């Protein structure tokens, strides 16, 4: 009888521990909601880029885009996503670097760009990620949500042709 109580107690303890862990993880990675602003203004000079030919075994290729806040309120950047796991993105604001973002990850990160300041969005593409069958034309999209009421989502498009090494 005592053995049954110990086993039942261990099972209950294990379930509580697992449930608590799942709860904590879900809170820490929950997407963030922000309030739109009439006075935060996201300005982007370039939203597309062509890498041209990308050697499959030549290592990662990168491109950095600039997002400027031309408004009078703080521009908030959240929900950075890429269209494929072969591509990741990272944001730098005033020397502070965000975590890497990818296709499936959800993040509670919020970047704040002061009026008149800029953020750098760096996109990193791994041409070898898909293996030898991954050669040919490729296009990847990156999206960034903002609190700019006129530009709630910024989308960046990058393309190139993954080629076999010579």
Image: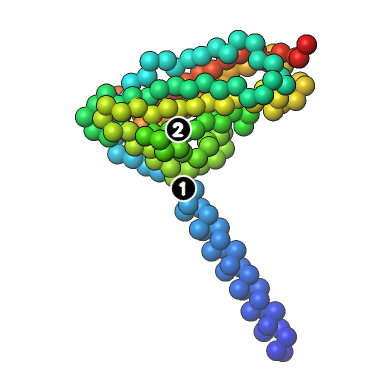
Tell me if 123 is positioned left or right of 36 in this view. right
Of circles 1 and 2, the one toward us is 2
Q: Quadrant of residue 76?
A: top left
Question: Could you tell me which secondary element the residue under label 1 belongs to?
Answer: loop
Rendering coords of residue 66 (x, y %): 40, 22
Question: Could you tell me which secondary element the residue under label 2 belongs to?
Answer: strand
Instruction: Give me the residue at 58% from left, 17% from top.
Output: 139
Instruction: Give me the residue at 35% from left, 27% from top.
Output: 118
Per the model, the C-alpha gap separating discs 1 and 2 is: 19 Å
Rendering coords of residue 64 (x, y %): 48, 22
Instruction: Work out which quarter of the rendered image holds the N terminus and state it.
Output: bottom right
Tell me if 131 is positioned left or right of 81 in this view. right
Which comes before the other along the chain, label 1 or label 2? 1
Residue picked out by circle 2: 91
Residue picked out by circle 1: 30
Question: Between residues 41 and 38, which one lies in front from this camera angle?
Answer: 41
């Amino acid at each position: 009888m005592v053995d049954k109580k110990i086993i039942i107690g261990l099972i209950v303890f294990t379930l509580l521990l697992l449930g608590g862990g799942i709860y904590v993880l879900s809170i820490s990675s929950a997407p963030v909601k922000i309030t739109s602003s009439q006075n935060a203004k996201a300005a982007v000079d370039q939203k597309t880029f062509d890498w041209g030919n990308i050697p499959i075994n030549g290592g990662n290729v990168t491109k950095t885009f600039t997002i400027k806040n031309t408004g009078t309120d703080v521009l908030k950047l959240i929900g950075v996503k890429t269209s494929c796991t072969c591509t990741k993105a990272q944001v730098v604001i005033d020397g502070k670097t965000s975590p890497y973002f990818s296709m499936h990850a959800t993040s509670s990160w919020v970047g704040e760009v002061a009026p008149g300041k800029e953020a750098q969005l760096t996109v990193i593409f791994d041409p070898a990620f898909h293996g030898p069958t991954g050669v040919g034309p490729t296009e990847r999209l990156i999206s960034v949500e903002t609190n700019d009421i006129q530009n709630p989502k910024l989308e960046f498009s990058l393309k190139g042709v993954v080629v076999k090494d010579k």
